[in-house]
Each structure stands twice: as structure tokens, then as C-alpha cells.
Image (spheres, helix red, strand yellow):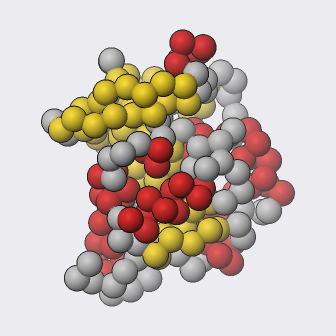
Amino acid sequence: MSHQQPIIGVLALQGDFEAHRKALERAGAKAVEVRTAAELAGVDGLVIPGGESTTMLKLLDRENLFEPLRRFGETKPVFGTCAGAILLASEVLHPAQPSLGLMDLTIERNAYGRQLDSRIVPLEIEGRPSEAVFIRAPIIRRVGSEVKVLAKYGNDPVLVEQGRHTVATFHPELGNDGRIHRQFVEKVASQTNGQGGK
């Protein structure tokens, strides 16, 4: 990268954070694991990986990270995948649960049911072929007027962005297309360098 290399954290409380860390490094970022508010304060952007969203909420509460994470997302980019997407939404269904409310989305947990417990499907991202690994995926039921849909599976949005934030209901860290992580790294780098540093 021509500018300062961004430092991107991966929330490492649960889920496949190691795969995200490697994907971010391949995309040109310095990737670090984040487990505390102090570690969160040292990064330019954050990835919230998949896992189990209710368990993740309990761990965030236990580590007193929920509020610091919400404040972090008010000024810095966050990328949520699967359970991470659920945490970024403004409304969660099936059942309702707390969320960070950083994106104007309504998302339903485990909405595909057994037929899509785990599957790799072809996908088109902004007109180019890709693939998506779904594992007990949530469904985005509503997107707000400022949310941009980047990819759909059937009629359902599966990759969306709003301002500095991005969510995917699948697992891009497990696929063979590094574009999504590269785009997030570029987004973080652009914001970081545009501010003249952190």
C-alpha cells in the first residue's frame, strides 16, 4: 500500500477469528486479535467474525466490551460476518436480542433452517462471479435507505454496506475470493490516511 498500513483488529472472543486474521494479512493489513477495550483502542478497524451471536453478547458483557465496541463503530469501520452481521444490525429477530445498532438492518437469526446449515453457493458481487460459504446463516429481512446491497443470494441481500461499515451473512474468510477483505482493508486505509493517522 502506498499509505500507512492499517491495523485491523479481529474480535477474538469466539468464532473463526484466525481465518479472518490470515485473510486480512493477505489483503495487506496488519491484523491483531482484540479481546479487551485497550486492544480495541489500538486498531483502525475491526472484524467481528461468525460464531454464535448470543454467546458473543455474553462474552462482550463479561469483558465490558459492548459499549466500547458501539462507540468504536461510531467513528471507525467495522466488518461483521454471520454472527458479526447480527451484532451490527439495528433490529434482530427470532428471537429479538440486543445489538450494536451500527447499521440500519433487520436481520433474522438462523433463518435458512436446515436446508442451508452449511453450503457453498455461486454468487455475483458487483457483477463479478464469486462464491459464498454459508453456515447456519442469518437472513437480512430489511435494509434501510442508506444501505447499499453489494450481493444477493436469491432475493436476499447477503453482502451490504452502510457508510464505513460492511456485513456479510456468509463467511468470506472461508472462500477463495479475497476481494471482500481487500475492499474492507482499503476502506480502513482510506479513512485512516484521510485522517492523517488514527
Q: Camera-side residue: 183 or 135?
A: 135
The answer to whether 133 is drawn above or below residue 153 in the figure is below
In this rendering, would 82 be left or right of 57? left
Q: Residue furthest left?
A: 127
Could you tell me which residue is drawn at 31 percent across and 81 percent down? 193
The answer to whether 48 is drawn above or below residue 36 in the figure is above
Could you tell me which residue is drawn at 73 percent across and 46 percent down? 57
Quadrant of the image containing the C terminus? bottom left
The answer to whether 150 is drawn above or below residue 173 in the figure is above
Q: x, y (%) of residue 27?
A: 35, 64
Q: Camera-side residue: 139 or 97?
A: 139
Quadrant of the image containing the N terminus? bottom left
Q: x, y (%) of residue 177?
A: 32, 47
Q: x, y (%) of residue 58?
A: 79, 47
Could you tell me which residue is drawn at 53 percent across and 55 percent down? 19
Q: How many marks?
A: 0
Residue 138: quadrant of the picture = top right
Q: x, y (%) of residue 134?
A: 49, 30
* Observer able to see residue 88: no
Could you tell me which residue is drawn at 60 percent across and 77 percent down? 41
Q: Residue furthest right?
A: 62
* Observer able to see residue 18: yes
